[in-house]
Image (cartoon, rainbow, N blue to C red):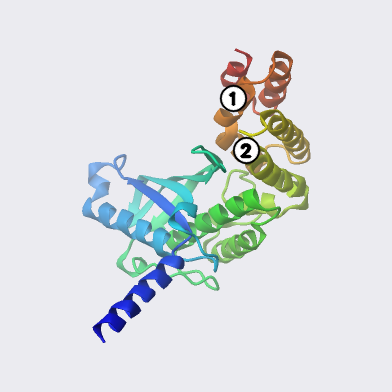
C-alpha cells in the first residue's frame, strides 16, 4: 500500500514537471534611485521582486511541454525611478529574450527592449496577481503577462515561420484591454513609436511578414547551422539584412527594426568579422546604414 502511495506521488510530481512553465525568468528590481523620503519601507521592494518572479516563473501560457533545458530564457530588469504615492511607482523596464543555438553552447539574444513608461502599483489589493486574459485587473499583472506573451511570440517565430502568431494575438488583445482601461503607453496607435504597443502593432502588420519570415531563417537556417556551413549561413543572414532594409524603408524608425539591432549588433559584428575582406566592407556599409548610431562599433567588422 505504501509503495502505491509513493508511486502515485511520484507520478504526480513527474506530471507536474512535464507541465512546467515555459519561460525561465531572471528578475531584478532596482529601487536604489528612489529618494529616501519617497522610498518608504524598503521591505516592500523585496516583496515586490519576489511576487514578480513568482508570477513570471509559475504562470503557464501554452499546452506545449518544455523540459528544463528547453525553457525560454528571459531577463527582466525593472528600475523604479519615482514614487507617485503610497505603493505607486513609475520607471522603466528592460526586457531581454535569449535563444540557444542548436549544437552549441552559444546563446543568441533574439529580442531586447526598454519599456520607458511603466507605472505600477503594489497596493495590498494588487498583490494577489491573478491573471485573466479576458479582463484587465492591474497594470503590473498586465505588464508581466504582456512581456511573457511577447517573449513567446519572438521565440516561436525563431523556430517556425510565423510560429509566434497565436501569442501575438493574445498580446494584442491584452494591450487593447489595458488601453481601454488606463490608456497611456498601452494605447494602440499612440504616436510615441517606442511605446510597448508598437511591438505587436509592428509584428501583426503585413508589412512585417517578410521581416518575420526572415527572422525564422536567420535563426533556424543560419545560426543553427552556422558551425556546419558558415558561408551559407552568412549568405542567409546577408539576405535577411536586405529584408530588414526593405522593411525599414516601408516603416521608418519602426520599433521592431530598432529592437533587432539592439539585440543583434554584437552578434552581427562577430559573424561578419570572419568574412572575406570584400564581404566585410559590404556588410559594414549595409549594417552601419541601417543602424547608424553604432557605426563606430561596426568598424570592428573591418579589422
Report which residue position mark 1 lands on. 269
Residue 173 visible somewhere in the drawing = yes
Residue 190 visible somewhere in the drawing = no
Report which residue position mark 2 lands on. 223
**Real-space CA distance between mark 1 and mark 2, rounded to the nearest whole angstrom:** 14 Å
Label disc, if present, on residue 199 of the rendered structure? none
Query: Counting other residues with Cα less than 10 Å from the Cα at mark 1, is it few (<14), some (14-19), or many (20 or more)?
Result: many
Work out whether residue 60 or residue 183 is closer to the camera in this orientation and state it. 60
Comparing labels 1 and 2, the label whose residue is closer to the camera: 2
Residue at left 38%, top 75%? 11
Above or below for 246 versus 38: above
Residue at left 75%, top 49%? 209
Quadrant location, the N terminus: bottom left
Q: Is residue 141 left or right of residue 239?
A: left
Q: Point out residue 254 in the picture as x, y percentages from the top left corner.
A: 67, 41
Q: Is residue 173 left or right of residue 8?
A: right
Secondary structure state at the residue bearing disc 1: helix
Secondary structure state at the residue bearing disc 2: helix
Q: Point out residue 196 in the picture as x, y percentages from the top left corner.
A: 56, 50
Amino acid at each position: 500500500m505504501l509503495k502505491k502511495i509513493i508511486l502515485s506521488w511520484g507520478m504526480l510530481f513527474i506530471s507536474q514537471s512535464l507541465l512546467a512553465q515555459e519561460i525561465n525568468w531572471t528578475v531584478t528590481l532596482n529601487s536604489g534611485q528612489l529618494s529616501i523620503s519617497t522610498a518608504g519601507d524598503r521591505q516592500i521592494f523585496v516583496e515586490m521582486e519576489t511576487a514578480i518572479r513568482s508570477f513570471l516563473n509559475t504562470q503557464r501560457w501554452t499546452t506545449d511541454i518544455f523540459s528544463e533545458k528547453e525553457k525560454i530564457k528571459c531577463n527582466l530588469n525593472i528600475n523604479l525611478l519615482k514614487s507617485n504615492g503610497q505603493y505607486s511607482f513609475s520607471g522603466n523596464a528592460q526586457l531581454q529574450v535569449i535563444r540557444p543555438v542548436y549544437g552549441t553552447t552559444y546563446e543568441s539574444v533574439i529580442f531586447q527592449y526598454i519599456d520607458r513608461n511603466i507605472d505600477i502599483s503594489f497596493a495590498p489589493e494588487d498583490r494577489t496577481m491573478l491573471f485573466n486574459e479576458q479582463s484587465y485587473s492591474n497594470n503590473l499583472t498586465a505588464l508581466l503577462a504582456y512581456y511573457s506573451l511577447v517573449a513567446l511570440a519572438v521565440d516561436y517565430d525563431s523556430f517556425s515561420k510565423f510560429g509566434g502568431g497565436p501569442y501575438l494575438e493574445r498580446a494584442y488583445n491584452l494591450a487593447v484591454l489595458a488601453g481601454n482601461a488606463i490608456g497611456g503607453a498601452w494605447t494602440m496607435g499612440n504616436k510615441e513609436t517606442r511605446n510597448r504597443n508598437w511591438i505587436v502593432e509592428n509584428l501583426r502588420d503585413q508589412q512585417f511578414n517578410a521581416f518575420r519570415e526572415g527572422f525564422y531563417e536567420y535563426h533556424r537556417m543560419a545560426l543553427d547551422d552556422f558551425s556546419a556551413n558558415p558561408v551559407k549561413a552568412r549568405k542567409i543572414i546577408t539576405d535577411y539584412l536586405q529584408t530588414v532594409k526593405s522593411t525599414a524603408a516601408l516603416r521608418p524608425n519602426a520599433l521592431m527594426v530598432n529592437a533587432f539591432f539592439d539585440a543583434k549588433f554584437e552578434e552581427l559584428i562577430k559573424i561578419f568579422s570572419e568574412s572575406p575582406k570584400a564581404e566585410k566592407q559590404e556588410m559594414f556599409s549595409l549594417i552601419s546604414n541601417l543602424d547608424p548610431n553604432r557605426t563606430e562599433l561596426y568598424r570592428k567588422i573591418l579589422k
